[in-house]
């Protein structure tokens, strides 16, 4: 068990990163901390996909010369997924930061409980 864990330490670190991000997302009330937790989850997922795509002794799938045997190269799909995921993650982070700035300008706080209480108060005043 321990030798398997030491051999696959990248996957273990990825799972720990994802768990830390998930716990931060669940238990923190500050919107910036939630955003950091979401980015930790992304980093854990990207590390996991990258470590699954890596195989010892193989090279990146860039053809050089006459070596066209597929056993000499790694699978390029996880690398493509990670690159696409990073682009999506950066975009989502930018949108979430913009929404967080808008919420702060309106409610002057980043605490989700306070924002929820203020929205309930605004809703009661409207009706």
Image (tube, rainbow, N blue to C red):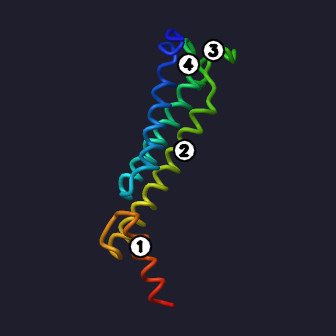
> Residue at 54% of width from left, 38% of height from top?
82
Q: CA distance from mark 4 to mark 1?
A: 56 Å
Asked if disc 3 and disc 4 are in contact, CB closer than 8 Å, the reply is yes
Q: Is residue 77 left or right of residue 46?
A: right
Does residue 120 appear left or right of residue 76 in this picture?
Answer: left
Q: Residues within 10 Å of mark 4 (few under 14, many from 20)?
A: some
Q: CA distance from mark 1 to mark 2?
A: 35 Å
Residue bearing the label numbered 3 = 72
Q: Secondary structure at mark 1?
A: helix
Residues packed near mark 2 inside 10 Å, few (<14), some (14 to 19) or many (20 plus):
some
Q: In what element is the residue under mark 2? A: helix
**Spot occupied by residue 26 in the image (x, y as percentages of width and height):** 46, 50
Which mark sits nearer the N-terminus, 3 or 1?
3
The residue pinned by badge 1 equals: 117
Circle 4 or circle 1, nearest the eye: 1
Distance CA(mark 3)–CA(mark 1) = 59 Å
Q: Which mark is residue 85?
A: 2
Tell me whether circle 1 and circle 2 mark residues in contact (CB < 8 Å).
no
In the picture as drawn, the residue positioned furthest to the top comes out as: 3
Mark 3: secondary structure: helix
Looking at the image, is mark 1 or mark 2 earlier in the sequence?
2
Residue 68 is drawn in which quadrant?
Answer: top right
Which residue does the numbered mark 4 point to in the structure image? Answer: 59
Q: For residue 96, which numbered disc appears in the image? A: none
């Amino acid at each position: 068990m321990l030798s398997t864990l030491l051999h696959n330490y990248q996957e273990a670190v990825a799972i720990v990163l994802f768990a830390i991000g998930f716990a931060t997302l669940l238990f923190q009330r500050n919107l910036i901390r939630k955003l950091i937790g979401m980015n930790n989850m992304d980093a854990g997922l990207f590390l996991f996909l990258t470590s699954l795509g890596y195989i010892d002794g193989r090279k990146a799938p860039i053809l050089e010369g006459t070596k066209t045997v597929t056993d000499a190269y790694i699978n390029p799909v996880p690398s493509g997924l990670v690159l696409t995921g990073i682009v999506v993650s950066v975009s989502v982070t930018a949108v979430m930061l913009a929404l967080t700035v808008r919420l702060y300008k309106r409610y002057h706080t980043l605490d989700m409980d306070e924002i929820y209480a203020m929205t309930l108060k605004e809703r009661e005043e409207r009706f």
